Image (tube, rainbow, N blue to C red):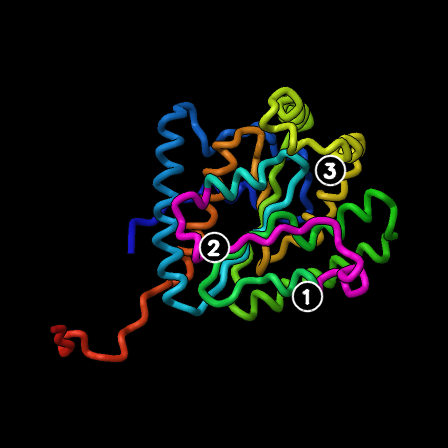
Amino acid sequence: MQKKIRLDSTERFAVTPPFRLDSIDPGDTTFRGIDKAVAQASLAELSQRLDQWQNVLYADQRYKILLVLQGMDTSGKDGTIRQVFKSVDPLGVRVAAFKAPTAEEKARDFLWRVHAQVPKAGEIVIFNRSHYEDVLVPVVLGQIDALEQERRFAQIRDFERLLHQSGTVLIKCFLHLSKEEQKRRLQERLDRPEKQWKFDPADLHAREQWNGYQQAYEALLNATSTEYAPWWVVPADSKTNRNLMISRLLIEQLERLGLRFPEPQFDPSKIILD
């Protein structure tokens, strides 16, 4: 359909256990480069290509795309969605945002609410946070023990294997933000009236437990990065770098699927329009 993009540089950001989170610099700008104008032009081009691929994905009807976005507060989950998909037909993309579970959701297994949101054939679904919240917050707060943590890791691997075997391509991205950059972004929210509504004092509690969350993320990355559902660590201090890398990852995965438009079930040359 179009010229393929070489993405060799993404491989070093893929998680292969045993993996150390500090082996990747959140300030890395491999994908942004030096020239900001060139980077922004590349992002616009990639978004347009993603729109073209989404059209073929929908027509093909054999596969589904699930993009999982996880990261600390202010790592840019919302911004990624806005920028990466800005040129994509909104009818072909759906966002599912997972907040603290409701009483009804808590009464069921932790994957119940997640399974209901997975993509259907030809659809791209973005998880803004995800089932991985259930092996992060409860771990850091001490609400589950190591045995339950391992049990949930195993259940997640089984769940994602089911999705993979049913035609879902999983692209899991951890938005790797430095503590210093998070401080800058939180301060910006406080300083700018139009952003103050986004500030939640509860975020400061999570920030106080920064090291605990980093350890929990490292554990889940190692436990759930599989051949059928790999994790990528996305350096996210630079918003442009973050957006470019995720755009490239999406297009790379779409290119590998051999997507095609279906053959018409009629002879177009014999259709005569009045």
Residue 231 in view in this figure: no
Residue to which mark 2 is pinned: 93
Q: Position of residue 65 (x, y in %)?
A: 50, 58
- Quadrant, the C terminus: bottom left
Per the image, label 1 sits on a secondary structure element best described as: helix
Judged left or right of residue 52, residue 204 is right
Q: Secondary structure at mark 2?
A: strand
Instruction: Find numbered disc 3 in the image and state the secondary structure of the residue it sits on.
Output: helix
Q: In the rendered image, which residue does mark 3 sit on?
A: 214
The answer to whether the residues at label 1 and label 3 have Cβ atoms under 8 Å apart is no
Residue 109's x, y, as percent? 77, 64
Crowd class of label 2 (few under 14; some 14 to 19; many from 20; radius 10 Å): some
Q: On the image, numbered disc 1 is attached to which residue?
A: 158
Q: Is residue 143 visible?
A: yes
| Mark 1 or mark 3, earlier in chain | 1
Image mark count? 3
